[in-house]
Amino acid sequence: MKIAIVTLSLTNNYGGLLQNFALQYALKRLGHEPVTIDYLRALFATSFIRCLLSWLKTILFYYVPLKRRVFIRYSRKAKRSAWSNEFVEKWIRLTAKCYKYKIKELEGCDAVIVGSDQVWRPRYNYRIEDRFLEFAKDFSIKRVAYAASFGVDGWEYTCRQTRICSTLAQKFDAISIREESGVKLCKEHLGVDATWVLDPTLLLTKEDYLPICRKVPICADKYLAVYVLDENDDVKKLYEKEAAIRGLVIKKFYADLKSTLTVPEWLAMFRDASYVVTDSFHGTVFSIIFGKEFKCIHNKSRGSARFESLLNLYNSGKLNEMRDFSLKWLKTALEK
């Protein structure tokens, strides 16, 4: 079965890239032919006010070293960095680039999967209705949501978004959600039943990821890896304390515009670390996958529901059981 995948733009985000790699990998194992729609939206293309506010924030953050960022050009189209593009070209199958979803991206496909990551969170999606396939609302195709995420346990949609997206959600053949709390949100606000499943990255094991980073030399030093998206004094004190207790040197790694690691190097960070401190969802995921001790800091501004759902499952010791369930759900959803 040829399957199109609709997800967040595959730009400079380690977790975003790896969740799509993992979903394609799992689908190939099931005998399918997945391809991800390479959607790259124009940044702030529809709102000069939003662009202006971004410039003002950039000026204010200039005096805060940890939050310093670059100016965004008005209507500039999103681009992949060299390191992210290298990974995508080697490990992910994509359509031609597009800057607007169109039905032609689904032609020749038997099914479309929406997911994973926070594809159903309005603040991360300019046209949230397109993540519910509004652009293909009258197109005949099997529709599946795999591990779609709202990111939070509260409802962030406007009344108009709720009305449109609930109608579109009811056209789906099967819906699964990445966080347990999202099942309730689907029922109460979209009027659809949903199943709780794992993020695609957790469908794979350490052995599946090791080939990606096999050419990165193993670091012989024992270190505490700090992968923190939003650092402050309290977080700094926490990881310095953890490092002192364990007698480890601190190695800090960055994300987004501060990224310097390739995807293989980023994976090797978890492979070789003795301990990890992170406020990243996928940082937590890969700490678990590589069997590391870790301290997870809930990042409420980026969505804490996903942390709570993952950690509750991990602490219960039922992660492997949930992996088998999630794979079975995906297989059944595409076959029925």
Image: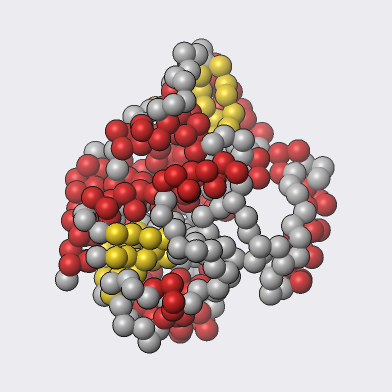
Number of labelled discs?
A: 0
Work out which quarter of the rendered image holds the C terminus and state it. Answer: bottom left
Above-or-below relation of 11 to 167: above
Screen quadrant of the N terminus: bottom left
Q: Quadrant of residue 141?
A: bottom left
Q: Residue at x 55, y 30 (%)?
A: 226
Measuring from the top left, give residue 5's x and y in whole percent. 39, 63
In the rendered image, residue 177, in percent from the top left (x then y), is placed at 34, 62
Q: Is residue 138 above or below residue 331?
A: below
Which residue occupies 46% across, 20% down?
A: 217
Considering depth in this image, is 305 or 40 the residue closer to the camera?
Answer: 40
Q: Nearer the viewer, residue 37 or 161?
A: 37
Q: Can you see residue 149?
A: no
Type of colouring: secondary structure
Whether residue 5 is visible? yes
In this rendering, is residue 57 above or below 313? Answer: below
Say left or right for 323 vs 38: left
> Viewed as shown, does residue 10 lie left or right of 147?
right
Q: Residue at x 60, y 43 (%)?
A: 82
Residue farthest to the bottom, as pictured? 138
Image x and y of residue 233, in percent: 66, 34
What's the residue at 39%, 41% (across, down)? 285
Q: Position of residue 316 (x, y in %)?
A: 26, 41
For the residue pair 188 and 196, the one nearer the viewer reads as 196
